[in-house]
Image (tube, rainbow, N blue to C red):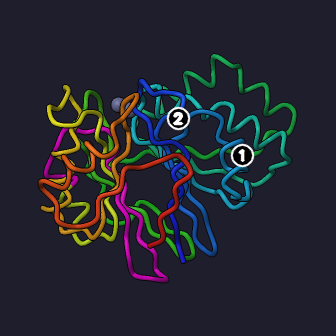
Amino acid sequence: MAQVILLGSGAALSDETREHTYMVVQSAKSAILIDCAGSPVQRLAKAGVELDSIDHVVLTHHHPDHIYGLSIFLLDLWLAGRDKVLCIYGLPETLRAVRAILRAFEWERWFDHGFFPVLFNRISKRQRGALFVTPDLAVFTAPTQHLLPTIAVRVLSSESGRAIVYSSDTRACDAVVDLARGAEILFHEATTRIKPSVGHSSARQAGAQAARAGVRKLVLVHLPPQTDADAFRAAAATKFDGQVIVGKDFARFEF
Ligand SMILES: [Zn+2]
Ligand SMILES: [Zn+2]
């Protein structure tokens, strides 16, 4: 069975209980990292995910809390002995930022010492159909409405026929509802509880989005410091009749 493991669940400003929001989708035959914060290798080890199982990284946008872990992730994979290709997907703006960061670390020199191949794959804002497929997962994206170009991500398991969707950062928008339609679980950002901040959603709006999309479960992520879990859950539940879960680091969700 495929599962999502939250490697982090916090907003850009987080606290001692939450790393920034990013996650790994793991199935029998593959694993996909969505966003890349903190120290991914440490978190993946703690989650029990084999580094070699990850061949794909999808980056939703180039705010620091979503991509700052990529440089150390690449370096650590190499130090751990990786020699096969890693595919990284992002909007042109996202990949431009990632490359600039890697250039600051003079990563081109790493290739003189046998660094593994990295393939950058641009996501078009007009992307239709699957972005890529693995033996048992298919990945789809849609542009969200955030402070800079951002995508939401849908992952479909061919084993179960079920899908999960991650809103990434966004104000409540139709594109996420359309992408999430009929999904098993919607991981939606809830940077605030009731009143949304600019470019972001509240827990209450996340509930409304889940109801509109007709998903079975809503998991709130991208949570602020000292989140009052009961209050966030209740805010979402005013709009959504299904199960509402307040995300926690290392929480697992099968689909
Ligand atoms: Zn963010
Ligand atoms: Zn952002």
Q: Quadrant of residue 91?
A: top left
- Compute the Cα span from label 2 to label 1: 35 Å
Comes first in the chain, label 2 or label 1: 2
Q: Is residue 175 magenta?
A: yes
Would residue 168 appear left or right of 116 to someone viewing this image? left
Judging by the rendered image, the residue that carries numbered circle 2 is: 17
Q: Quadrant of residue 74?
A: top right
Which three-letter amino acid code belongs to the residue tagged 1?
A: Pro
Q: Residue at x 28, y 52 (%)?
A: 142
The residue closer to the viewer here, 249 or 227, is 227
Would residue 34 appear left or right of 103 to someone viewing this image? left
Judging by the rendered image, the residue that carries numbered circle 1 is: 117
Q: Residue 90, percent across and down?
A: 44, 43
Circle count? 2
- Residue range highlighted in magenta: 153-176
Would residue 254 appear left or right of 80 to someone viewing this image? left
Q: Secondary structure at mark 2?
A: loop
On screen, 231 above or below 130?
A: above
Q: Is residue 252 magenta?
A: no
